[in-house]
Image (cartoon, rainbow, N blue to C red):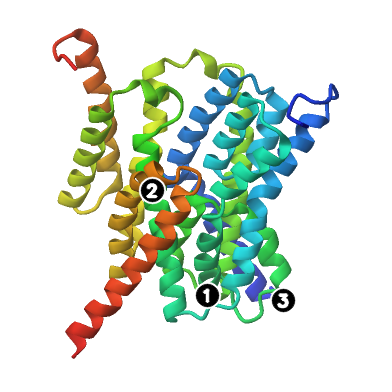
Amino acid sequence: MINYASFDTWWWPYVFIAVAGWLATDIWRWLGVLVGNRLKQDSAALTWVRAVATALLAAVISKLILYPSGELRAVPVELRLIAVSAGFAAFLFFGKRIWIAIVVAVGLLIGGQLLLGSGLLTG
Amino acid sequence: MSDPSGQRGVYWFFKGARGITSLPAIILMSAFVGFCGFAVEAGIPLGETVFMTGMIWALPAKVLLVGSILAGVSLPAAFITVALSSIRLMPMVAALIPEIRTEKTPTWLLLLLSHFIAITAYVFTMERIQDVPRAHRLAFFAGFGTTITSANIILVAVIYSTVANLPAMVAGALFFLTPVYFLTSIWASTRERAGHIAMIIGLALGPLFHQVAPEFDILYAGVVGGTLAFVADRVWKRRVGS
């Protein structure tokens, strides 16, 4: 099977990225344009499409928190959930200001790890 | 002076470009620092990392592509993995297009500019587009989209050699910024009740479908959650109306 390391030339990885990355994402954008061009503003169909888009994004959000990539995986899942919930609660409570959610959530995430690391809490 | 509407267009293009200093843009750039670290760790060379940033643009698709490269999967398998995870771009683009086009907007221009649509550009535009005159919405979006994409391409190229020295705790926090930001900004920018219901159902269905059908979880959660929210909203409206 042809994979990323199949050919020892400088250009092959770029072809691989163009096909498996660029083409695989932009075909959906092009289809979205063709569909979106037919949707009338304030129509029920557009409300449905918007609801689907929102639910998709919400699913991405919960997956980014529950099944993260990179260094975030090392943080206990309970701490991640507490941090994001407290951040969202603070956001709702203090007039829907996004930066408040970020300060609270990231503060708890880092503070919680420092506490866990210092052994003050046993996780 | 001979073309006042063209000049207004330039004004709105730069107004959109100025979005580079907005909170969503700054969060996205932090997330790109996190991605760049991930690419370095995976052994993807500088040129390819920069190329990916510009050509794919959607961050989750890039993370998946790097994962596929690491796993040594075949080209068709990598294509299918990335394509399946990117289906979500279609309803996002379809929802955004009616907001930014006019009767006269040529389709080829929309096809070209659609490349700059990813979650951040979607959220940023949906949040602010109501305050932009319809004739200039496409210019506003193009200004933001091209600027933030170029800025992140440059950012990735510049930090590539130093990003490996980032402390693990900071790198983890960078990955955490994105979901917190998406959660709050989408909630704040959603104008309809159907959207808020969709958000709550989607949050719950994402992990649920991940257990049942991990390959298609986002797609199922979106279609099922969005449809449930849409129907619930209709029923609610009818009850209150009658």
Rendered view: B179 above or below B1: above
Considering only order in the chain, which callout, 1 or 3, is on the residue closer to the N terminus? Answer: 3
Quadrant for residue B170, please give it. Answer: top left
- At horizontal 34% and vertical 35% (from top left) the residue drawn is A66
How many C-alpha atoms fall within 10 Å of the one at disc 2: few (<14), some, or many (≥20)?
Answer: some
Residue type at the position of mark 3 = Ser
Q: Is residue B88 above or below residue A116?
A: below
Q: Quarter of the image containing the N terminus of chain B? A: bottom right
Residue B81: percent from left, percent from top: 60, 42
Q: CA distance from mark 2 to mark 3?
A: 57 Å
Label 1 sits on what residue type? Answer: Arg
Q: Residues within 10 Å of mark 1 (few under 14, many from 20)?
A: some
Vertical placement of B232 versus A28: above or below?
Answer: below
Mark 3 surroundings: few (<14), some (14-19) or many (≥20) residues within 10 A: few
Tell me whether the residue at label 3 lies in contact with that at label 1, contact meaning CB atoms closer than 8 angstroms: no
For badge 2, the amino acid type reads Phe
Residue matched to label 3: B2
Task: Give the SS element for disc 2.
Answer: helix
Label 1 with label 2: CB-CB less than 8 Å: no
Disc number at residue B134?
1
Quarter-of-image position of residue A21: top right
Nearer the observer, B145 or B214:
B214
Q: Of the two numbered discs 1 and 2 on the same chain, state the one appearing first in sequence.
A: 1
Query: What residue sits right under mark 2 in the picture?
Result: B209
Label 3's element?
loop
Mark carried by residue B79: none
Between B114 and B203, the residue placed more toward the observer is B203
Whether the residues at callouts 2 and 3 have beta carbons within 8 Å, the answer is no
Rendered location of residue B50, percent (x, y): 67, 32
